[in-house]
Amino acid sequence: MHPILISRGRMLGYLAVWIAFGLQLSGVMFFGGGAGARWSVLFAVPLAVLLGLQSLSFWYLVQLMPPDRTPATRMAWMWTVAGLISLAIWLTMAYGWAQFLLPPGEEYPASAMGAVPVMIFAGGVAIVLAILGHYLLWAFQRSREAERQALESQVLAREAELRSLRAQLDPHFLFNSLNSVAALIGNDTAAARHMCFLMAQFFRKSLTLGREQAIPLAEEISLAETFLAIERVRFGERLRTNFNIADDVREISVPPLMLQPLVENAVHHGVAHMLEGGEVTVHARRRDRFIELIVENPCDPDRPPSRSTGVGLVNVRSRVEKLCGHRASVDVDAGETHFRVSILLPAAAAAS
């Protein structure tokens, strides 16, 4: 459909331009041609509107001959022919309209033929401007379409990245969990069976909730608690947990699998290296229009260098950036005896 016809405002604005052209043409005929004021307006304004409606067909020729794919000579020849045909049709309508306005039994004086050159010149200029205007409209439409496609590409790329990041989290946790089960099978088969049950429970939850764009924080906390219960089978009393969750944030929505990689890092790179074990602490609270999630754990200052690729923390940071941009932050405080990760999310954005 013609882009001018899809909006009433555009159509009214387009007609207003041609009415203004008709008034200018009637002024030329009144002051320069000696025609009556009323007759000039009745003759020129409707003809100008007709030329404007007739010029709407130029849009389809513009689409058939886009300037970036049409040779200049072909465009010049085609538009010359189309312009002459359009001008001839308009002059024919002008002659018929002039005859309609003529009172019965009267004839126009021979001097009225002097208006023909004015009509030819005015019609030719109007047609050229209409053609140029349609090419400007075409360029505007192409620019809008390019912006829309670029935006769609960005959205698709963002969704693909998020799916990729989410897909990396599950294999990472599965790899570490299976290693834990393998370590327990030879020493404590009951603990290994219990750990397998907890793993099945965890993956059932994570696969279900992982399909969602956002889940209540209470569900995310439950996933983290299940993970720590799995790890407690292996570490026993060495692993202690402390969840300090404010009541007013439990129903706020957050991206799924946001806390699990952080508590996993807290166990494997913190508590696991300490002979006496340690406590993994999870805080969640409101800060004005934001929700703050904190995961902290003690560290052994003499622990060996980590050989981990750091996929968990990198994924969390990437997901926060992709979902919230500059409105959110991930801060890491890595001391000799402690490790702390703080995530700040806009509560309203997270809930959407």
Image (cartoon, rainbow, N blue to C red):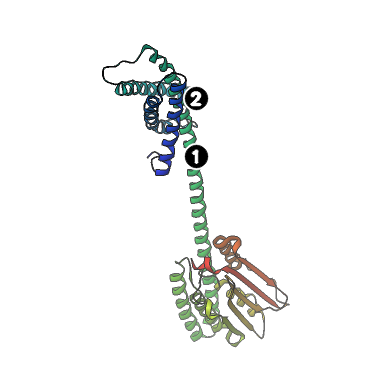
Q: Answer few, some or many: residues within 10 Å of disc 2's Cα (few below 14, many 20 plus, some between 14 and 19).
A: few
| Spot occupied by residue 238 in the image (x, y as percentages of width and height) | 61, 85
Left or right of 156? Residue 263 is: right
Residue depth check, mark 2 versus mark 1: number of the one nearer the observer: 1
> On the image, numbered disc 2 is attached to which residue?
72
Most distant residue in the top direction: 110
Q: Residue 283, can we see it?
A: yes
Q: Answer few, some or many: residues within 10 Å of disc 1's Cα (few below 14, many 20 plus, some between 14 and 19).
A: few
Q: Residue 306, can we see it?
A: no
Left or right of 288? Residue 25 is: left
Q: Secondary structure at mark 2?
A: helix
- What is the number of callouts on the image? 2
| Spot occupied by residue 312 in the image (x, y as percentages of width and height) | 58, 68
Q: CA distance from mark 2 to mark 1?
A: 20 Å
> On the image, numbered disc 1 is attached to which residue?
140
Which of the pair 66/115 is nearer the observer? 115
Eyeballing the image, is 127 above or below 17?
above
Eyeballing the image, is 127 above or below 7?
above
**Three-letter code for the amino acid on which mark 2 is drawn:** Ala
